[in-house]
């Protein structure tokens, strides 16, 4: 059986390499936190890296209780990141370099500082409470848990801002699937729908090429708010558990059909990307039917243990599921919510990994994780479809595993009372210059989180000058991927064995062989002309490595 990706004119995302920028930690033109001008200053670096597009995590006005995923004003850049003019300048500067720009949209919840929620707090009987999920009662409305720990409901009078406020005696509960500072919106309310269509147009009018939709599977809730009776789960159902009343409800799809129509007003080249943690690839495919979103993050791939059978299966299943609806498959190894690949893949158990790693936790095998992460990136860049790279993965950055608890900011750390370290360790400011204070992250060297010492030798400037560095590898990898049209080629189904051997076929060029090894080495055929290799070797391909070659 041949696996293949379909192509369609104008839909640039089908073959794109999309680089995730986490603005707090990418580059700063001023203080200890990254900003939009900092990003503009690094666009040439991204162009040289060879990516096609950037996705920028939220930069809107926010109290930053969840690092910007708690939005107080969807139409304004937070002064910490710059101005709306800077955002327009960034889009323009990216377009001048041929880079597309995807911005983040957070529709499941607002910040509790959003004007709507503030009005709702002030006005217990008012219509603003219908914009969210407020409920009366002595008892908590149901058993739903927050993804960040503890209950998903807070009583208005129990808020830390309640004493002395007009709502200090208000006993209504409100729903928040994340932090109590992130109240869930009620998507059954037409006012919510109208507002977000307008927000999409606001940013489309400023030239953005698309949106990454946060918690895309969460917007619609079962109106009856029934108990769930299962463990807190981010995904749509675990094992035999029934569909949860708060995830992956069928009603979400109507919203994305409406949004598709909004984007189509601007042309066929605007993208919607689903962040949907659903249990089955077949469920995920529903988000990318032709009249809905453009593509969805392939978290199954990210969560797959690093072994040959699991990889073979997830690659085949991902291509088949997305092909069934004509959507491009995506390949994702890291983002701002999971332990960095170079550390995660060195743990005794690979897969999604824990929520952060502390110095007292099981430590990864550093070299093994590094080798596997580069091998996995070399493999994923060979596969048909679109690939995502989280900032710093091109430098082989590890997780910061020795952060002091006193500097942590992730609400998951606080709501689990430290049982989970949380995601700060994958959000460390980028090292740009080996010999500068703060490794060149900001003019003064100040950084909002401390950087580990290993980041010095991994700094971008040191790697750019080193032909054997991960950065040099990524530049070659992305250039070869483009030159050889890997994203639109056809792939064979690889044979069973200790390693994966794909053959990428495209008319007009030689077949490209792609081998990824796991625990065992593999033979490199005599006469193989190597195009890309995840690390230096000659003769036999060592374990945990990947190579592209022609014969
Ligand atoms: O993430 C969805 C989400 O909840 C998971 O990725 C979760 O963070 C992970 O399982 C670790 O607990 C999105 C954003 O990517 C994330 O940064 C936000 O915190 C979250 O939504 C709420 O907006």
Image (tube, grey):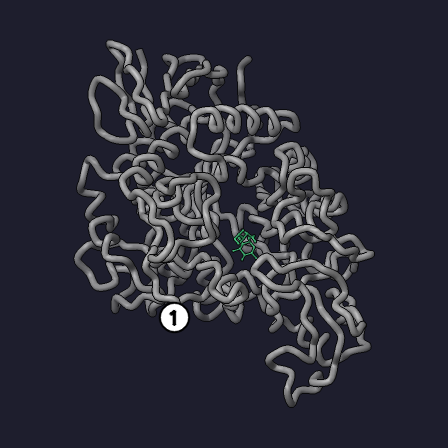
Q: Which residue is mark 1?
A: 406
Which quadrant holds residue 318?
top right
Q: Position of residue 515 (x, y in %)?
A: 36, 21
Q: Give the SS element for disc 1.
A: helix
From this view, report whether residue 57 is shown above or below residue 65: above
Ligand 1 in which quarter: bottom right
Residue 91 visible (yes or no): no
Which quadrant holds residue 379?
top left
Front residue (pair 34, 271): 34
- At 78% across and 52% down in the image, what residue appears? 222
- At 68% across and 62% down in the image, what residue appears? 184
Residue 178 visible (yes or no): yes
Question: In screen coordinates, is 78 left or right of 172?
Answer: left
Question: In screen coordinates, is 112 left or right of 408?
Answer: right
Question: In screen coordinates, is 142 left or right of 209?
Answer: right
Q: Position of residue 25 (x, y in %)?
A: 38, 59
- At 60% across and 38% down in the image, what residue appears? 294
């Amino acid at each position: 059986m041949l696996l293949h990706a379909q192509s369609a004119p104008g839909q640039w995302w089908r073959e794109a390499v999309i680089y995730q920028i986490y603005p707090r930690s990418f580059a700063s033109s001023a203080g200890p936190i990254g900003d939009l001008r900092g990003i503009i200053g690094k666009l040439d670096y991204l162009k040289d890296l060879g990516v096609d597009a950037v996705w920028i995590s939220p930069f809107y006005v926010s109290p930053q209780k969840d690092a910007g995923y708690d939005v107080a004003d969807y139409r304004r850049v937070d002064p910490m990141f710059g101005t709306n003019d800077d955002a327009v300048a960034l889009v323009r500067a990216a377009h001048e370099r041929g880079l597309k720009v995807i911005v983040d949209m957070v529709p499941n919840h607002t910040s509790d500082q959003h004007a709507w929620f503030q009005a709702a707090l002030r006005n217990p009987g008012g219509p603003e409470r219908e914009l969210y999920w407020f409920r009366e009662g002595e008892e908590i409305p149901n058993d739903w848990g927050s993804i960040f720990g503890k209950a998903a409901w807070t009583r208005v009078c129990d808020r830390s801002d309640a004493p002395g406020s007009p709502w200090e005696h208000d006993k209504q509960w409100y729903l928040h699937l994340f932090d109590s500072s992130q109240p869930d919106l009620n998507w059954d309310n037409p006012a919510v729908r109208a507002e977000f269509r307008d927000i999409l147009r606001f940013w489309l009018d400023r030239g953005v090429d698309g949106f990454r939709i946060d918690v895309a599977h969460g917007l619609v809730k079962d109106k009856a708010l029934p108990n769930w009776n299962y463990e807190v789960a981010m995904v749509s159902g675990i094992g035999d558990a029934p569909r949860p009343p708060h995830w992956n409800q069928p009603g979400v799809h109507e919203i994305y059909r409406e949004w598709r129509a909004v984007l189509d007003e601007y042309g066929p080249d605007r993208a919607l990307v689903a962040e949907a943690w659903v249990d089955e690839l077949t469920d995920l495919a529903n988000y990318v039917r032709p009249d809905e979103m453009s593509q969805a993050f392939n978290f199954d791939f990210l969560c797959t243990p690093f072994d040959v059978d699991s990889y073979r299966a997830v690659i085949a299943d991902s291509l088949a599921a997305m092909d069934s609806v004509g959507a491009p498959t995506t390949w994702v190894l890291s983002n701002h919510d999971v332990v960095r690949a170079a550390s995660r893949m060195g743990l005794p158990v690979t897969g999604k990994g824990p929520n952060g790693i502390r110095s007292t936790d099981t430590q990864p095998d550093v070299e093994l994780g590094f080798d596997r992460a580069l091998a996995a990136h070399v493999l994923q860049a060979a596969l048909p479809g679109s690939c995502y790279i989280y900032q710093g993965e091109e430098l082989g950055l590890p997780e910061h595993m020795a952060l002091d608890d006193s500097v942590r900011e992730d609400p998951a750390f606080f709501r689990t009372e430290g049982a989970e370290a949380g995601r700060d360790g994958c959000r460390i400011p980028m090292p740009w210059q080996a010999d500068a204070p703060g490794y060149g992250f900001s003019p003064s060297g100040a950084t909002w989180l401390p950087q580990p010492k290993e980041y010095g030798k991994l700094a971008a400037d040191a790697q750019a000058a080193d032909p054997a560095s991960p950065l040099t590898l990524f530049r070659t990898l992305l250039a070869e991927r483009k030159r050889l049209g890997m994203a639109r080629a056809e792939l064979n189904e690889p044979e069973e064995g200790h390693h994966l051997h794909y053959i990428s076929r495209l008319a007009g060029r030689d077949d490209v062989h792609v081998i990824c090894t796991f625990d065992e080495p593999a033979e490199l055929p005599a006469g193989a002309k190597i195009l890309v290799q995840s690390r230096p070797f000659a003769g036999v391909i060592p374990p945990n490595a990947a190579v592209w070659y022609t014969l």
